Every structure is written in C-alpha cells, then in structure tokens.
Amino acid sequence: MAEKINIFDKDKDGVGSGAADGSGFINESHEELVKHLEADGYLQTPAISQAFRKIDRKDFVAPELQDEAYLDSALPIGFGQTISQPLTVAFMLELLRPKPGERVLDVGAGSGWQAAILAELIGESGQVVAVERIKELAEKARENVAKYDFIDSGRVKVITGDGSKKIEGEPPFNKIVAAASGEEIPEAWKEELVVGGRIVAPVRQSIIVIDKIKPDQFETREYFGFSFVPLVKSKN
Ligand code: SAH
C-alpha cells in the first residue's frame, strides 16, 4: 500500500495556499510567476528555482497565448493537449530532484517546457530523453527546446513514440517523470530505472513517487489532488 499524502495539509509534508485549479493569481512576468511559486512553497530548492527562472514559459506557448503564458494554469498546445500547470511542474520537479550528470526520461514532452527545465538541472554532463506520441508536438518541442541550445548539443533528445513502452537503446535512467496520467505505472518504467533511481508520475489524479531500492524492491508514496491529460498507450 502506498502512503497517502494530501498536499494541502501543511502539517504533512504539504505546501502552501495555492489553488490546484490555477485560479490563485495573475502574473505580469515570468519572474512574478516564479516568485509566487516560491512564496506558496511549490518551489523550494534553489537549483530548481534557478532553472525555472532561466527557462521562460513564453518560449513554449503559441503566439496567440503569449498574454497568458505566466498564469499558473495549463494552456492548450494543440491536438487536445496542454502545457502543464506551473505549480504541478514545480511540485513534481521538487519530488524528482534531478541532479547534474543524470539521465532523465521525460514522458509526454508536449511543448518541451519541462524537458528544458530538466536540461538546465542535469547540466552538460547529463541527458534528457523526452518522448512524445504526437509527431507534430514532438517537432514543436524540438523547436522550442532549441531556443536554449539543448538540441544541437544533444542535451535533450526528443523522440516520437509511446513513452509507456520500453525505449530501445536509451535506458537506464536515474529519474523518470511523466506529464500524462494513466491507470497505473507502466512496468517498463520500473525496469528502465537504475537502483537508487526515482519515478515521479501521475496516476489518475494523484502524483506517485516510486523509489527503486533493489532490482525487485520499490517504495511508493502518493500525493493526491491534481489534474492531468491522459497517458495514451499504443495498441501494439
Ligand atoms: N510537460 C509537457 C506536458 C504536455 S501534456 C508540457 O509542459 O508541455 C502531456 C503530453 O503527454 C501530451 O503532449 C501527450 O500527447 C503526451 N502523451 C500522452 N501519452 C503519451 C505516451 N504514452 N507517450 C508519450 N507521450 C504521451
């Protein structure tokens, strides 16, 4: 059984007063958005705050949505998908704690925003493998992430495909993070993870943290009360 944690319960490893539906505040700038995430306790680690500051969300949303780029809410990116809500990305990255030199699997690249923040965190000696099932979004993610010179340098590799299946030639990973929610954690992710590695992923409306203690031993925690687009599995 997973340990269950309500993130709005401050006494229990929880965070501040942010509304999970993104209705909390309107930000005029990227800096203001980051400051709000810090004040509400979603961003806690200096390195993660710094990476958030460096990667401007405006670079990942369409021209017609530029005015909304700094709202703490998910925004459409086409094909029925959304760029994730900032507080959710902050919360998941704080749980994931990516470190310089690590290899990270990012399932559901979408706009590429989270992949770029991850790239900043793992540094030159690390690598982010971002998988996106919708070809057009994978291309857009590549284009967006290239604004930060992470594509030509090879720091981020965007692959078109089903990230819930084993990815040929890329594992193992130190960390795995997913932006789309399934009914369970795919077995492939547990296999693709190194011992000592961590998965942070949504299952239904919760965020699940899984630590790989031994090849066949895992520890699970659950944080509930979030909203995600579905993880879609290919038929074959
Ligand atoms: N971090 C991204 C979130 C995009 S939303 C951002 O902030 O922009 C989640 C993405 O997961 C969608 O683009 C969706 O197409 C993708 N997705 C859903 N199921 C998938 C799967 N099985 N493999 C790869 N990508 C998947």
Image (cartoon, helix red, strand yellow):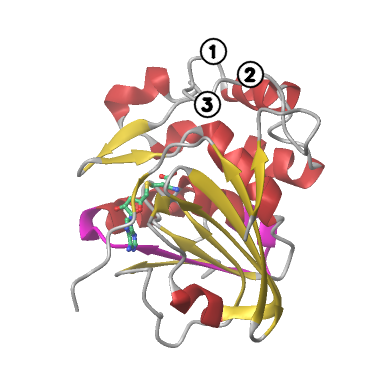
The local crowd at label 1, few if under 14, some if 14 to 19, many if 20 or more residues have their Cα within 10 Å, is few
Q: In the image, which disc is placed on residue 32? A: 2
Asked if the beta carbon under badge 1 is closer than 8 A to the nearest atom of ligand 1, the reply is: no
Where disc 3 sits, the SS reads loop
Residues at marks 2 and 1 touching, judged by CB atoms closer than 8 Å: yes
The local crowd at label 2, few if under 14, some if 14 to 19, many if 20 or more residues have their Cα within 10 Å, is some
Q: Does the magenta stretch include residue 153?
A: no
Q: What stretch is highlighted in magenta?
A: 119-136
Residues at marks 2 and 3 touching, judged by CB atoms closer than 8 Å: no
Residue under pointer 1:
28
Q: Nearer the viewer, residue 184 or 65?
A: 184
Residue under pointer 3:
20
Quadrant of residue 73 within the rendered picture: top left
Q: Residue 221 vs residue 100: left or right?
A: left
Answer yes or no: is residue 192 visible. yes
Q: Is residue 130 magenta?
A: yes
